[in-house]
Image: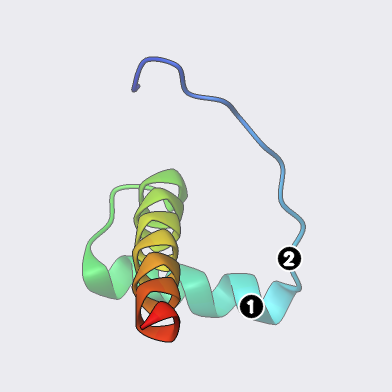
Amino acid sequence: MEEGVTRIGVSLPKNLLNEFDSIIRTRGYSSRSEAIRDAIRNYIAEYKWLEREEGE
């Protein structure tokens, strides 16, 4: 586990979790945590890109 990792709880509708789990299997993630970390990193990168685009 990464140093400084914080655990959080997340509540999701069952259908959203089922779809996410399906994607996790398809993409070959070893765990939900790994997939969620990757999704959050992608969200942050997209957010920062949009901020730069809107700022120009």
Q: CA distance from mark 2 to mark 1?
A: 7 Å
Identity of the amino acid at label 2?
Leu
Quadrant location of residue 33? top left
Q: Quadrant of the N terminus?
A: top left
- The foreground one among 23 and 52 is 52
Left or right: 15 as drawn, with respect to 28: right
Query: How far from the left and from the top, in percent, is residue 37?
Result: 41, 49
Q: How many C-alpha atoms fall within 10 Å of the one at disc 2: few (<14), some, or many (≥20)?
A: few
Query: How far from the left and from the top, in percent, is residue 35?
Result: 38, 56
Q: Return the residue found at the far top.
A: 3
The residue indicated by pointer 1 is 16
Tell me how many marks there are. Answer: 2
Q: Residue at x 52, y 80 (%)?
A: 19
Q: Residue at x 72, y 73 (%)?
A: 14
Callout 2: helix, strand or loop? loop
Left or right: 2 as drawn, with respect to 51: left
Query: How far from the left and from the top, in percent, is residue 40?
Result: 45, 57
Identity of the amino acid at label 1?
Leu
Q: How many C-alpha atoms fall within 10 Å of the one at disc 1: few (<14), some, or many (≥20)?
A: few
Q: Is residue 5 above or below residue 46?
A: above
Q: Is residue 52 above or below residue 35?
A: below
The circle on residue 44 is none
The residue indicated by pointer 2 is 12
Left or right: 18 as drawn, with respect to 5: right
Query: How far from the left and from the top, in percent, is residue 23?
Result: 37, 75
- The foreground one among 2 and 26 is 2
Q: Return the residue found at the far left.
A: 28
Q: Residue at x 37, y 15 (%)?
A: 3
Left or right: 43 as drawn, with respect to 6: left
CB contact under 8 Å: marks 2 and 1: yes
- The foreground one among 19 and 37 is 37
